[in-house]
Amino acid sequence: MHILYFHQHFSTPQGSAGTRSYEMAQALIREGHSVTMVCGSYAHGNTGLATPFARGRRRGVVEGIDVIEFDLDYGNHMGFLQRVSVFAKFAFGSIGVALREPADVVFATTTPLTAGLPGVFARWLTRKPFVFEVRDLWPELPKAMGVITNPVVLWLMSVLEWVSYRSADRLVGLSPGIVEGIAARGVDKSRIAMVPNGCDMDLFAAPEDAWRPDGVRDDQLLAVFTGTHGNANGLDAVLNAAEVLKERGCDEIRIALVGQGREKPKLMKQAEERGLDNVLFLDPVPKNKLTGLMAGADVGLQVLRNVPAFYFGTSPNKFFDYISAGLPVVNNYPGWLAGLIEESDCGFAVPPDDPVAFAEALLVAASDREALRRKGVNGQELAKTRFARSKLSSEWVHWVTAAAR
């Protein structure tokens, strides 16, 4: 059957963004289905298309995926109103595609929440089956973070959330908290499947040549964070831990923050002002090159702001990349990932807003490399047995395509 797939931030592995949609599209193709991917132009993504845009869009086949890309630039550096404008343009452009393009199933994935609009219109105007994937709970998360406070905007988002959930024949949630959040809006749990982000075992089994950033010695412990430097990530917690390490005269640990985002210039300025030469800032790198960096690193950092909505309501790509690469994880907030780390002994779960505990976890990691290696092995075993992308994508394909039946 043919799946019409909407993901505004779609990227192939040649980009430095998450590749869940690319991997799921490939899983559909392997099982004999065809896919049309509708997306925008994400600053850190790479759709695989290189032809010029004509009338605001371009189209071509990328590794078996029929890709329709709108000429809509988007990046984490944008302000709120800029983002809303791009979200709206993508949503309304996508509605036209959803109504015109043939499809056995229309699938849409957040973020943003407006990504569900083409599926809603296709469901009610053309009776096409609609499956909606929820990666973050909106408006719960932005409200909890204080990013959106206007009651009218929050009410409109809540209405859109309710309509999207009720319009979908089936839904996918990426974490336990997301599934519970969807069910709390009156959706029967029989219509919801949890399919978290997965581990690309093949990609990390044969990484590019291991490498380290300039200035990091082989005998130093290298801890890496790979992802957006945004408000939600709370990377000031990393700077605070680095300051504790400096105060203790520790020169055996280096921290590399890899990525881009609105908070990055501020973080870099703070690190310079505080003399934190043990923190390095790197530009985003494509996922295939990222495997080499992780092969050369010792620890992965899973960091978020201390917001209770995050505890069970997120499914971060970076965590699954870390354990795929055999990296022990230092996680700084409670919830389902902290539980996984403690249960499988694949890293360190430290209390939120506690720079001393964060720093001491890194010191323990640096002091016993054999114990650290065992944690990495445990993490890789967790990746293989519970979160292998091949297994999860097969479950996802069955769930999505069954909507047409």
Image: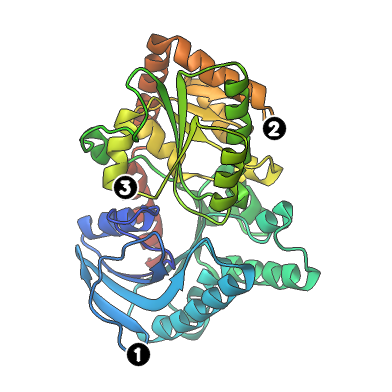
x%, y% of residue 150? 78, 68
Q: Which residue is mark 3?
A: 287
What percent of the width, then of the height, locates residue 180?
Answer: 63, 48
Q: Nearer the viewer, residue 43 or 344?
A: 43
Q: CA distance from mark 1 to mark 2?
A: 49 Å
Q: Residue at x 34, y 73 (%)?
A: 104
Q: How many marks can you see?
A: 3
For residue 343, side relative to residue 382 (left or right) = right
Q: Which mark is residue 55?
A: 1
Q: Position of residue 153 (x, y in %)?
A: 73, 72
Q: Is residue 395 left or right of residue 33?
A: right
Give the quarter of the image for residue 391: top left
The quadrant of the picture occupied by the C terminus is bottom left
Regarding mark 1 in the picture, which secondary structure is present there?
loop
Q: Is residue 184 above or below residue 383?
A: below
Q: Earlier in the sequence, mark 2 or mark 3?
A: 3
What residue is shown with label 2? 353
The x and y percentages for residue 184 are 69, 54
In which quadrant of the rendered image does the N terminus lie? bottom left
> Gap between marks 1 and 3, in whole Å?
31 Å
